[in-house]
Amino acid sequence: MGYVSAVPVPQPRAARSGAAPSGARRSLAAALLLGALGSTVVLLSAGQIWAEGTASVGGGTVPVEADGGTVTGVPTALAIVGLAALVAVFAVRRTGRALVSGLLALSGAGAATAAVLGAGDSSALDAEAARVSGNTAAAVEGLSHTVWPYVTAGGALLILVAGLFALRFGMSWPAMGGRYERSGAPRPARRKAAAAATTDPDRPEDLWKALDRGEDPTHGD
């Protein structure tokens, strides 16, 4: 009677080890896309007109308007911080990576909050009305807000989601300098060992090459 003794146990392990890097790559790509896209949306939409109205000047009215940077500079500043944090995630490891990921998420949350609050703010237009009319007590009339503050908030939420991805999956992502640390250090030793192995003491040209490298060609004889 024959017996079957081989059980292919390593195969599920190989499948699992192949699935983990694939999941890490997907989460990494998603975080990079969301973070870069969100920051771009915030920076672009913050430069658009957020609020508009009219101011009374000499018995008539003139239009006044304020862009996002005039209403609040917080979303733009936090979008830049978010971009820096997105890059820094790959330059640090362990606790540092968790802290930078948290900063990325907080940047998105703060920018979204500032954009939503700025959507109902009239102080920037009041200041513009006072400047145009020359009356410091002037207030804007016919105040209206555009959709751009909410577009800014939407971009900021993408930054927040990128930070949450980094917090959840960031520990499995590669570090920027890891490849060089693993492969860079042993190279001089490998080159020296290879050179020593190819030095033939019976060949004068090999002896001269060894001397040029600062080696003792008679060492080990």
Image: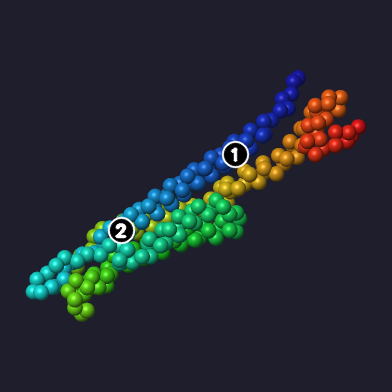
Single out the residue that lies furthest toward the right: 221
Above or below 150: residue 212: above
Q: Position of residue 87 (x, y in %)?
A: 50, 52
* Residue 183 makes an appearance in the image: yes
Q: Quadrant of residue 7?
A: top right
Q: In this view, does 118 lie above or below 14?
A: below
The local secondary structure at tag 2 comes to: loop
Sequence order check, earlier mark of 1 and 2: 1
Q: In this view, does 155 lie to the left or right of 125?
A: right
Identified by mark 1, the residue type is: Arg
Q: Which of 2 and 15 is in front in this view?
A: 15
Please provide percent x and percent y for residue 48.
28, 58
Q: Position of residue 134 (x, y in %)?
A: 19, 76
Camera sees residue 160: no
- Identify the amino acid type marked 2: Gly
Comparing 206 with 198, the one in front is 206
- Which labelled disc corresponds to residue 16? 1
Residue labelled with disc 2: 47
Front residue of 157/55: it is 55
